[in-house]
Image (tube, rainbow, N blue to C red):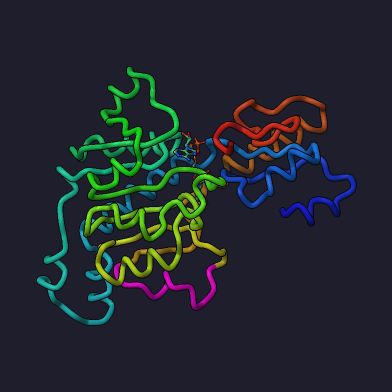
Amino acid sequence: MSRQKGSKGQNLQLLLTAGIGSDHVDLNAAAAAGLTVAEVTGSNVVSVAEDELMRILILVRNFLPGHHQVISGEWNVAGIAHRAYDLEGKTVGTVGCGRIGKLLLQRLKPFNCNTLYHDRIKMDPELENQIGAKFEEDLDAMLPKCDIIVINTPLTDKTRGLFDKDRIAKCKKGVLIVNNARGAIMETQAVADACSSGHIAGYSGDVWNPQPAPKDHPWRYMPNQAMTPHISGTTIDAQLRYAAGVKDMLERYFKGEDFPAQNYIVKEGQLASQYR
Ligand SMILES: NC(=O)c1ccc[n+]([C@@H]2O[C@H](COP(=O)([O-])OP(=O)(O)OC[C@H]3O[C@@H](n4cnc5c(N)ncnc54)[C@H](O)[C@@H]3O)[C@@H](O)[C@H]2O)c1
């Protein structure tokens, strides 16, 4: 929903996202026009965190080439094993540690990894202790420590293109990256080049720039990728939750009632803090 499209809706008042992530709306234009933007905060966070854990394991164990061998009639254990590792003992860092980031770190705990997180906000000490992850204030200081990096920030003016050529170069050689947040947080060609050179040893995610990804999108053809279409937050369980959340907000809207406070992305000209 661009500024131009929004301005055509003379009676437009409300924009609801059936899920999480409202970067498809020009939020500054919506705020200036006095529109309300809301999403079903939390509705698919478990679905995405579970999916991230799956992608980490798929990359660490070099699962996909093994599966492809089965389909193509091959049997070459050494061809898989030379790049397969245990997750135990590896360092996993999440860039962004809101709802999804925290759920992922909680799910990683039994795997006995070292976990790090970078966010604008440090967790309260009790929760941090319970989750067992270390806060890294400086993103560029965290990156070289990580065997696996997971992206969990919204797409904002500050995170667009955050992982360009220079920042990817700061990551460990052979890093694995999982990104279910937004494709535009990465520079498309920089990721493809780093996968080709082996600096990134594996890249997996479900978000692309643009979406739907065109047939010639470089991430479809780069080596060592485990990409899917945008599916991680669309399990049947998640669909039930965000459908119920949208219905609830529409009912409240027509009764003149407020939405749950955490659902507002733009309200009375103000952007929610995670988008500022
Ligand atoms: N692939 C999918 O299906 C899917 C589904 C749901 C959400 N998402 C994406 O995941 C994102 C995160 O979701 P969430 O529910 O965890 O959101 P959240 O608001 O709970 O957490 C986002 C975190 O990112 C941090 N952050 C924001 N800007 C930052 C910056 N510049 N540097 C460091 N940290 C920053 C915030 O402080 C916050 O802790 C969504 O915005 C959306 O883009 C994708």
Point 30% across, 57% down: residue: 169
Q: Which residue occupies 29% across, 41% down?
A: 142
> Can residue 235 be seen in the rendering of this structure?
no
- Magenta residues? 213-224
Residue 217 inside the magenta-drawn segment: yes
Q: In which quadrant of the rendered image does the C terminus lie?
A: top right
Q: Position of residue 51 (x, y in %)?
A: 39, 50
Q: Is residue 135 left or right of residue 159?
A: left
Q: Does 88 sit left or right of 160 as displayed?
A: left
Residue 60 screen position, x and y as percent: 22, 56
Image location of residue 209, percent across then percent down: 53, 62
Residue drawn at x 56%, y 46% as measured from the top left: 157
As drawn, which residue projects farthest toward the top?
A: 126
Q: Is residue 113 magenta?
A: no
The image shows residue 110, relative to residue 210, as above or below, that is: above
Image quadrant of residue 218?
bottom left
